[in-house]
Image (cartoon, grey):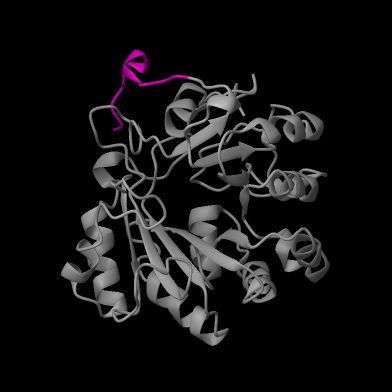
Amino acid sequence: MTKTIDLATLNYYEQEPEDNTFQDIFVDITHRCNMECKNCYLPTRTPPDMQLEKFKEFVKRIKGKCMIRIVGAEPTLHPHCVEFIKAALGAGHLCILITNGLRLSSESYVKKLQDTGLQHVYISMNGVDKNEWYQEIDDMPCAKKKLKAFKNIANKFSIDVGTIIVKGVNEGAPKRMMDLIKEHNVQNITMRIKNVGQIGRYMEDETENMKLEDLVKLCSEQFNLPEKYIWDFYKTNHRYAGAPEVCGIEFPLDQTQDPKFRYQGRWVKLTNWDTDNEVGIPDPGSTRRGRITPEWKIAPFYEHLKLNEDGSGY
């Protein structure tokens, strides 16, 4: 079972937006969702939606050019989701929408997203194209809608596809995802393959979870790549010099590709969400990921999640 941790040991702090040091900032604009996935870091549905006008003021104050991650639960359920994206881009930041993709099965909704100038979309596809995988992991046989959404966004955005690997369920997902990418001839995409994170609601405890080594082996076998090739990218951060990526590995599928061109071509990012460490959260002490708090400060992402598992924070 997951160990009990002393929350007082977390390296928690808050910053004013003018003092921001984070490169990625998570903005949980709603706690509502149209799914009840078995792995969810934000499973509480009662907190109110984020206020758009306050966010517009806040995002202008953030120091530096950041990647603003519009997320939820499910952000497309917020009636002003598109306006949040416009506000982030209008303030000069990069922006990515992180979604389960159900609303993106509507072509008209995808057109609204395109019209904002949004360039990056992250869609979760834990079951890829198999209803039985979605049923087992996300408690909903939604392959048809997920595939329609993927088709709608293919080659219209730089795409990130998120897939949580659960032992004994969807370990064949990496290859099936690659087949889907080839079917739609998607040129610029990152497959984000991760294990289960023990925060919020989750299926696997630390002792039963996949480890980073397991994910490397899985990808090596299914993409026909040497394990050494993958491990050679460990602790390399392609976006931020001097900020080693210690909780994951990102690498191009084409071994001849120049890795300097991070968002060109087909990539894989392995992420270790496991909490099997002394602190009991994924990637403890990370200075890359921040999160907006209900008091309109910016706090370390994973630390803030852990302190607010009861849903009291955004």
Give the residue displayed 34% in from the left and 74% down from the top: 258
Instruction: Residue lying at the far left in this picture: please name it.
Output: 228
Q: Is residue 155 above or below residue 204?
A: below
Give the residue displayed 55% in from the left and 44% down from the top: 66
Q: How many marks?
A: 0
Q: Which residues are magenta?
A: 1-13
Residue 225 image offset from top left, x and y in percent? 24, 77
Q: Is residue 284 above or below residue 246?
A: above
Q: 264 or 121: which is nearer to us?
A: 264
Residue 179 image offset from top left, x and y in percent? 46, 82
Give the residue displayed 34% in from the left and 78% down from the top: 257
Q: Which image quadrant for residue 153? A: bottom right
Image side of residue 89 versus residue 161, left or right:
right
Q: 145 or 78: which is nearer to us?
A: 78
Whether residue 50 is visible, yes or no, is no
Instruction: Residue lying at the far top in this picture: please name it.
Output: 8
Image side of residue 83 versus residue 30, left or right:
right
- Does the magenta run of residues contain 11? yes
Q: Which image quadrant for residue 269? A: bottom left
Image side of residue 247 versus residue 203, left or right:
left
* Magenta stretch secondary structure, dominant: loop
Whether residue 144 is visible, yes or no, is yes
Q: Is residue 67 above or below residue 123?
A: above
Residue 100 image offset from top left, x and y in percent? 62, 55
Image side of residue 258 versus residue 76, left or right:
left
Residue 180 image offset from top left, x and y in percent? 51, 79
